[in-house]
């Protein structure tokens, strides 16, 4: 599996298996009921369009809140109108709980990075103001010294 970092997000591109004949891009939206996330996906495309699916996911990732998943699948799975029964609760077109558990650490790190970046963005104006105030004080002190030196010469 390739983990592709975009400017603001991630794309998880699962490697095609020899029997995979289709590929979908899946992604999630925010929970509507506070418990179950909304699921979205593209229509199944022939596996020959795998690279195009990865490229499209990379283009779209920065516009999304959650990561995108490029999921190759067999023709059996692609022909099912709804998510196949995989024994998991998310039903995300072949994305199993084990796969999501493996990605959890990466997603947590990404969220922590985003929080730190946002905090720095919010603190930046206050930090700049403090630096400018120190500079104003320092310039004022230097002006007083210069004035004293000039008065002493005169």
Image (cartoon, rainbow, N blue to C red):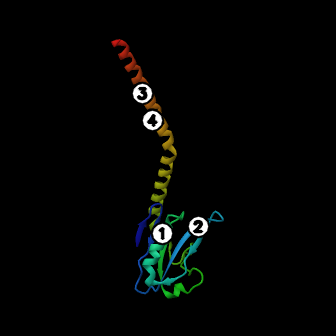
Earlier residue among tags 1 and 3: 1
Give the SS element for disc 3. Answer: helix
CB under 8 Å between callouts 4 and 2? no
Q: CA distance from mark 2 to mark 1?
A: 17 Å
Task: Estimate the spatial distance between the alpha carbons at disc 1 and disc 3, rounded to whole Å.
Answer: 49 Å
Q: Vertical placement of 36 versus 133: above or below? A: below
For the residue labelled by badge 1, is the local secondary structure a helix, a strand or a loop?
A: helix
**Residue at the disc numbered 2:** 29
Label 1 vs label 3, nearer the camera: 3
In the image, 87 versus 139, the foreground residue is 139
Q: Secondary structure at mark 2?
A: strand
Q: Could you tell me residue 31's position as x and y percent? A: 62, 65
- Badge 3 vs badge 2, beta-carbon distance below 8 Å: no
In 3D space, how far apart are the residues under numbered discs 3 and 2 (Cα atoms)? 53 Å
Q: Nearer the viewer, mark 2 or mark 1?
A: 1
Residue at x-position 46% and y-position 55%: 113
How crowded pointer 3 is (Cα within 10 Å; few <14, some 14-19, many 20+) is rated as few
Residue denoted by label 4: 131
Which residue in the protein does label 3 denote? 139
The circle on residue 59 is 1
Helix, strand or loop at label 4? It is: helix
Badge number at residue 49: none
Q: Residue at x 38, y 13 (%)?
A: 151
Task: Find the distance from the CA under tag 4 to the CA under tag 1.
Answer: 39 Å
Question: In this view of the protein, which residue sits in the foreground, 82 or 43?
Answer: 43
Could you classify mark 1 by the number of other residues whose Cα lies within 10 Å: few (under 14), some (14-19), or many (20 or more)?
Answer: few
Alpha-carbon span between mark 4 and mark 2: 41 Å
Mark 4 or 1, nearer chain start: 1
């Amino acid at each position: 599996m390739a983990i592709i970092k975009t400017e603001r997000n991630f794309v998880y591109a699962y490697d095609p298996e020899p029997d995979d004949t289709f590929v979908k891009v899946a992604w999630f939206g925010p929970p509507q009921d506070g418990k179950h996330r909304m699921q979205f996906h593209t229509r199944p495309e022939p596996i020959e369009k795998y690279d195009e699916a990865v490229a499209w996911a990379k283009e779209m990732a920065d516009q999304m809140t959650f990561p995108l998943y490029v999921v190759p699948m067999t023709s059996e799975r692609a022909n099912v109108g709804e998510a196949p029964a995989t024994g998991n609760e998310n039903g995300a077109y072949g994305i199993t709980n084990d796969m999501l558990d493996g990605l959890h650490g990466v997603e947590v790190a990404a969220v922590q990075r985003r929080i730190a970046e946002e905090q720095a963005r919010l603190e930046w104006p206050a930090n700049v103001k403090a630096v400018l105030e120190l500079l104003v004080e320092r310039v004022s002190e230097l002006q007083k010294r210069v004035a004293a030196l000039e008065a002493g010469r005169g």
